Image (spheres, grey):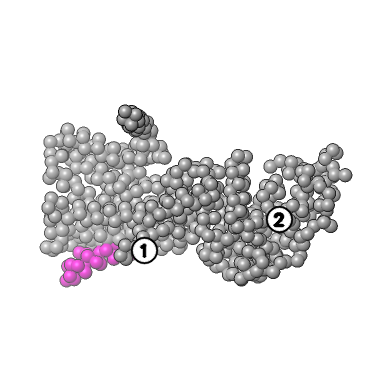
């Protein structure tokens, strides 16, 4: 009898605790992206009969894959209290390198490796200049944004190249069972990133470097090396994503496009990662990227013009930033 | 700190037989370096033309609290940075247990068992208590070519580290941001003491704390001493120095003025050594009639 009574009591107090949590703005701030995604799914699910169809969900996940990878890279950089404005340029550069190498007769695997190396190169330059020359991340990555876009235009002579490759075609359209390859690649990236951040020494040092660089250095952490690594990871993921981009559009397009840059920062902010560094996770930015992609998808299905879509993204990001002030 | 309060001699300090003639300790006669844990041997540190520390010789024993006092700019912090491996001395030697050591980084010093609790504490607010305790000394488990954090082991050992020093903190999973000033200090001290360290250096360990928290941290420092660790402490608080320390060294403008066993000196004497003012003068200036020693 008494045991049942106690269990009932703890059950009650747990429910009370949950209720208390729900009233805390901090709870909502920590779960901004997830809550927004759920609301969005409900609203679009009611508003559009196709939104929740398996085909459309697949389409959203595939469309989100590139942004998820860029956002994970951006998250690593922002966790060190930096910012990487060059991700979209590194992405463009990577796909142009792939296209040029392939169209000049290189083998596809080698072309893909070169694309990844191009992304890494952008990241390494960012990291070295920021950590060693002590120049503000904002300025450095603004510089490499322009420089990488420039190199992409020079390499391609400003002309897009069509890439006809069975490998890329299979990558873009194939799936394992019901799960498209794109989704698998992005999911693996996210899972590995989560493990690196929370289950390796490097991850802890990254959080320490972003949270309190002075303290990290006092404990013997080489914060310069951590920062270089963070930008290199971001560059690497941009290079990897460039293969997916080339596969998706079947071409290497050298024209600059900042949508991916803005959305990667937006996804990270929506995901509850502090722009001051040191706090955040990987799941948040991934959900943030899904949210932004689902938003565009849903608004398109409802027949809302692209101009309003941009406006909607802007409003959501600013609202998320306001909620973040309540973070614990 | 109320200056007047700290200069008022306690009854114990006014006991007869405490004048310089009765003292057993002579700071000009150093012991054999292998008899003490830390021996600083004629150390100087110059920054260009600035002589921050000039020819300082002092020592500290295990199981004792050794205080370094002195005015701002007396060279205490520079000396401590030399011992902790933050800076290399321009000349002179540092001996640990009689063995000369050369540190090119705080990591080197740490490997020899010298830990420093900085005034800023060097805690990362957004990390949990156990993550801070193990910062840059994370326990890992190897799986093939990769090594992963052994979070369970670190949590268990963290709980033990805090329990050993009777630090009362509800949960090691809390972020340091949620801790009070005293709790943070306790975490930083536990971390310094928790690595088989032989010498723990503390820079103003209670400067930012309230009365009750100061008392807790002082208890903690005494526990380190009782464990046989040599504690080297910089403090501006004379009451604290008199209360805690076994040995006091006084520095003025980069030089060592002298050393005393704490039970053989008074706050007044230390102040006169720090300022270089005559002891009698100070007594006249600060003592009220009824407290004036006969």
- Which mark is in front, 2 or 1? 2
Q: In the visual, does A15 lie left or right of B262? A: left
Q: In the visual, does B81 lie left or right of B174? A: right
Q: Which residue is mark 1?
A: A124
| x and y percentages locating residue A61 in the rendered image | 19, 48
Chain under disc 2: B
Q: Which residue is mark 2?
A: B248
- Mark 2: give few (<14), some (14-19) or many (20+) Cα within 10 Å: many
Q: Which of B65 and A113 lies nearest the eye of the viewer?
A: B65
Using the numbered discs, state the Cα–Cα distance from disc 2 to disc 1 in whole angstroms: 51 Å
Label 2 secondary element: strand
Q: Residue at x 19, y 67 (%)?
A: A109
Residue B123 to residue B54: above or below: above
Picture quarter containing residue A98? Answer: bottom left
Picture quarter containing residue A31? Answer: top left
Residue A328 showing in the rendered view: yes
Q: Which residues are magenta?
A: A97-121
Q: Residue at x 53, y 60 (%)?
A: B196
Q: Which mark is residue A149?
A: none
- Mark 1: give few (<14), some (14-19) or many (20+) Cα within 10 Å: many
Q: Quadrant of the N terminus of chain B?
A: top right
Q: Residue at x 71, y 55 (%)?
A: B248
| x and y percentages locating residue A50 in the rendered image | 12, 39
| x and y percentages locating residue B86 in the rendered image | 57, 62
């Amino acid at each position: 009898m008494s045991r049942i009574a106690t269990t009932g009591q703890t059950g009650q107090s747990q429910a009370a605790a949950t209720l208390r949590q729900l009233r805390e703005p901090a709870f909502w701030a920590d779960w901004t992206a997830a809550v927004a995604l759920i609301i969005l799914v409900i609203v679009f699910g009611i508003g559009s009969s196709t939104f929740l169809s398996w085909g459309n969900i697949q389409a959203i996940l595939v469309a989100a894959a590139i942004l998820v990878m860029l956002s994970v890279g951006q998250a690593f950089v922002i966790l060190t209290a930096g910012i990487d404005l060059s991700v979209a340029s590194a992405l463009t550069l990577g796909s142009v390198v792939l296209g040029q190498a392939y169209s000049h007769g290189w083998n596809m695997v080698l072309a893909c490796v070169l694309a990844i190396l191009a992304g890494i190169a952008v990241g390494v330059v960012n990291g070295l200049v920021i950590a060693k020359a002590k120049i503000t991340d904002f300025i450095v990555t603004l510089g490499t944004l322009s420089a990488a876009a420039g190199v992409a235009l020079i390499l391609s002579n400003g002309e897009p190249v069509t890439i006809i490759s069975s490998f890329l075609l299979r990558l873009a359209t194939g799936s394992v069972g019901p799960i498209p390859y794109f989704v698998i690649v992005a999911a693996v990236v996210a899972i590995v990133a989560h493990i690196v951040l929370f289950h390796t020494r490097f991850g802890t040092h990254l959080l320490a470097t972003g949270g309190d660089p002075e303290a990290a250095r006092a404990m013997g952490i080489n914060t310069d090396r951590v920062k270089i690594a963070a930008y290199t990871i971001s560059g690497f993921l941009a290079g990897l994503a460039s293969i997916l981009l080339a596969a998706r559009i079947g071409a290497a397009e050298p024209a600059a496009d900042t949508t991916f840059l803005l959305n990667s920062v937006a996804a990270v902010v929506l995901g509850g990662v502090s722009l001051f560094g040191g706090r955040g996770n990987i799941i948040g930015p991934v959900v943030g990227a899904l949210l932004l992609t689902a938003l565009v998808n849903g608004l398109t299905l409802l027949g809302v013009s692209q101009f309003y879509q941009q406006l909607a993204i802007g409003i959501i990001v600013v609202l998320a930033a306001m909620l973040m002030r309540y973070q614990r | 700190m109320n200056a007047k309060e700290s200069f008022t001699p306690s009854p114990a300090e006014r006991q007869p037989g405490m004048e310089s003639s009765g003292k057993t300790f002579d700071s000009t006669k150093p012991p054999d370096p292998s008899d003490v844990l830390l021996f600083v041997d004629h150390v100087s540190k110059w920054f260009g033309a600035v002589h921050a520390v000039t020819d300082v010789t002092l020592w500290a024993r295990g199981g004792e609290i050794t205080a370094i006092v002195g005015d701002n700019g007396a060279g205490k912090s520079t000396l401590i940075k030399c011992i902790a491996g933050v800076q290399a001395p321009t000349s002179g030697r540092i001996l640990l247990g009689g063995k000369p050591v050369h540190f090119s980084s705080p990591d080197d010093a740490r490997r020899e068992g010298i830990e420093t609790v900085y005034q800023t504490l060097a805690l990362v607010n957004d990390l949990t208590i156990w993550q801070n305790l193990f910062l840059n000394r994370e326990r890992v488990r190897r799986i093939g070519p990769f090594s992963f954090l052994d979070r369970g082991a670190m949590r268990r050992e963290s709980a033990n580290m805090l329990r050993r020093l009777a630090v009362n903190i509800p949960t090691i999973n809390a972020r340091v941001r949620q801790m009070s000033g005293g709790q943070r200090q306790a975490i930083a001290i536990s971390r310094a003491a928790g690595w088989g360290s032989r010498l723990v250096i503390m820079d103003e360990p209670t400067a930012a704390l309230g009365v009750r928290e100061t008392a807790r941290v002082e208890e903690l420092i005494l526990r380190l001493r009782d464990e046989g660790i040599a504690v080297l402490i910089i403090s501006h608080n004379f009451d604290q120095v008199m209360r805690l320390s076994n040995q006091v060294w006084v520095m003025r403008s980069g030089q060592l003025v002298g050393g005393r066993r704490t039970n053989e000196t008074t706050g007044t004497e230390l102040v006169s050594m720090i300022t270089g003012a005559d002891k009698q003068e100070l007594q006249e200036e600060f003592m009220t009639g009824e407290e004036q020693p006969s």
